[in-house]
Amino acid sequence: MRYFFTVFLLAGLVFNSAAQTKEAPKEEGFEMKQYYFVMLTKGERRSEITDTAKINDIQRGHMANINRLAEMGKIVVAGPFGDNGNWRGIFIFDCHTEEEVKELLNTDPAIKAGRLAYEIHPWWTAKNCVFK
């Protein structure tokens, strides 16, 4: 158990150090790549929009936008959470900058309407990782 904790702690230090310097962590056997993890949360206007037809219209636009971004290769993972908490879903973006992620997020009708909000976090994983 002590060995596992030490390895876990050292791995965390490697990833944290690399993330602060924007360099890919070096691990033997594979190369790391930065993606962007987006946590979708309940938006400030979520409870204000109560018309079912309007909510359904926003949701259709939200899904169409996800599909469009996936076809562009920008979203590599997307999905909702199964409970009714404040966290609504996640996206993993394959983009060059956080600014690019923000621009793409702001094309989402649910975000524009205030039904969803977001947090963006740089996230590292193996380069050319297959999410399918």
Image (cartoon, helix red, strand yellow):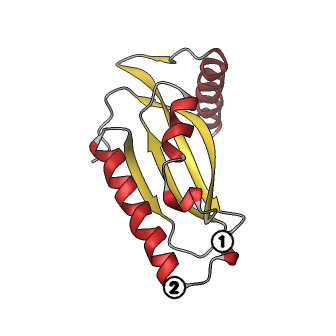
Q: Do the CB atoms of the residues marked 2 and 1 lie less than 8 Å apart?
A: no
Q: Residue at x 39, y 44 (%)?
A: 75
Disc nearer the start of the sequence (2/1): 1
Is disc 2 placed on a helix, strand or loop? helix
Locate residue 53 relative to residue 46 in the image: left or right.
Answer: left
Q: Which mark is residue 52?
A: 2
Determine which residue is flagged by label 1: 46
Residue 88 in the figure: left or right of residue 86: left
Q: Residue 10: which quarter of the image?
A: top right
Q: Nearer the viewer, residue 45 or 4?
A: 45
Please provide percent x and percent y for residue 71.
27, 45
Asked if 25 appears above or below 112 in the picture, the reply is above
Measured from the top left, where is residue 38 in percent x and y? 55, 46
Which amino acid, by three-letter code, is at mark 2?
Answer: Thr
Q: Secondary structure at mark 1?
A: helix
Would you identify the image quadrant in which residue 73 lies?
top left
**Residue at the image position 59 percent from the left and 25 percent from the top:** 15
Q: How packed is label 2: few (under 14 Cα within 10 Å), some, or many (20 or more)?
A: few
10 shown above or below 123? above
Residue toward you, 23 or 118 = 118
**Image height of 54 relative to 79, above or below:** below
Q: Mark 1, residues whose alpha carbon is within 10 Å: few (<14), some, or many (≥20)?
A: some
Q: Nearer the viewer, residue 38 or 44?
A: 44
Q: Which quarter of the figure is the N terminus placed in?
A: top right
- 78 to the left or right of 47: left
In space, the residues marked 2 and 1 are separated at their CA atoms by 12 Å
Q: Residue at x 46, y 44 (%)?
A: 92
Residue 76, position as x, y percentages in the image: 36, 43
